[in-house]
Image (cartoon, rainbow, N blue to C red):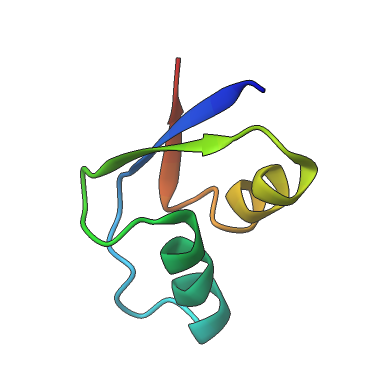
Amino acid sequence: MATIKIKQIKSRINAPKDQKATLLALGLHKIAQVVEVEDTPSSRGMIRKVHHLVSVID
């Protein structure tokens, strides 16, 4: 299956608890960290929820 590379570009400080939990579920812990996740509807929904904190890398 295809994968998506995600990079955290902003801090999660002052973000709501649900958005912090979403970042952890995606595997992101630090700014500028890049992770690769499966391209599924659930992972796309998580990315959409924290789109202001992450960037999708081509």
> Closest to the observer: 30 or 15?
30
Query: Residue 49: where, in percent of width, then height?
Result: 64, 58
- Looking at this view, name the residue that lies furthest to the front: 1
Q: Residue at x 56, y 26 (%)?
A: 3
Query: Residue 17: where, in percent of width, then height?
Result: 50, 85
Query: Residue 19: where, in percent of width, then height?
Result: 52, 71
- In the image, residue 11 sits, relative to residue 17, either above or below, namely above
- Looking at this view, name the residue that lies furthest to the right: 41
Quarter of the image for the N terminus: give it: top right
Q: Residue at x 24, y 44 (%)?
A: 33
Task: Classify residue 2 by image quadrant.
Answer: top right
- In the image, residue 23 sits, relative to residue 5, either above or below, namely below
Quarter of the image for the C terminus: give it: top left
Q: Residue at x 43, y 76 (%)?
A: 15
- In the image, residue 22 sits, relative to residue 43, either above or below, namely below
In the picture, measured across the screen, residue 31 lies left or right of residue 53, that is left
Task: Classify residue 57 by image quadrant.
Answer: top left
In the picture, measured across the screen, residue 20 lies left or right of residue 51, that is left
Q: Residue at x 73, y 38 (%)?
A: 40
Total residue callouts = 0
- Looking at this view, name the residue that lies furthest to the top: 58
